[in-house]
Amino acid sequence: MDHVTSKFLMWVLFNYGNGICKLCGEIEEGSHNIIIECEVMKACINDFQTTLLTLHGEQITKDEMAFGLVGNPIGEMSRKANLRNYITFIIRHVVFKNRYIDFGGIERAKLLLKNKVRDRVKKELLNKWIEHRERNAKEEYANKYLIENILGRLENDNLILSI
């Protein structure tokens, strides 16, 4: 059996369909494609690039795309690094969850998933705000999720998101 045939059989056995990423249209070289090679994933990460760099001043590596900053040897995680991990986790989760949808081309997939990611980040931050507000832990919320007002601010007991 040649290399191409064995790859095709692997895709069929593991239910990868025809081996073409539905998001970016490229041949998947393995299950890691969606996390570190897919152009749609990269576009979603790049959409948050300024925010992510503000939280942790190093460029996003393939290891971080796959595992978060915990995959990098940075020592104890700062609050900003933890928040960056949280955002990149949300991005990975949204893109991975939508990997079987054919959006009708890579540009449309990028646009729609960037919007889905942004909406999901806002929803997560709002849900965390509601939880913290109910526990009267507003300062804890601000210290954990709004560090230096990077993602938003609290104003008159209201959450104002800037992402």
Image (cartoon, rainbow, N blue to C red):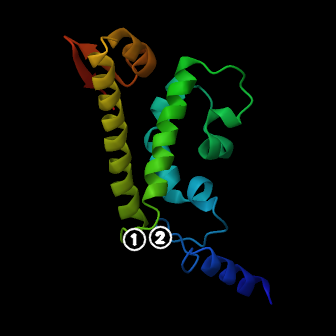
Residue 76's x, y, as percent?
68, 19
The secondary structure type at the circle numbered 1 is loop
Residue at 40% over, 67% down: 101
Residue at 61% over, 81% down: 12
Residue at 61% over, 61% down: 33
Is residue 27 left or right of 51 when viewed as pictured?
Answer: right
Residue at 51% over, 40% down: 89
- Quadrant including the N terminus: bottom right
- Quadrant including the C terminus: top left
Q: Amino acid at mark 2?
A: Lys
Q: Amino acid at mark 1?
A: Asp
Checking the image for residue 22, the label placed there is 2
Q: CA distance from mark 2 to mark 1?
A: 5 Å
Residue 46's x, y, as percent?
48, 44
Q: Are marks 2 and 1 in contact (CB under 8 Å)?
A: yes
Question: Please, is residue 81 above or below residue 154 in the view?
Answer: below
The secondary structure type at the circle numbered 2 is loop
Question: Please, is residue 14 above or below residue 73 in the view?
Answer: below
Which residue, as the protein is rendered here, is positioned at the far front? 135
Residue under pointer 1: 102
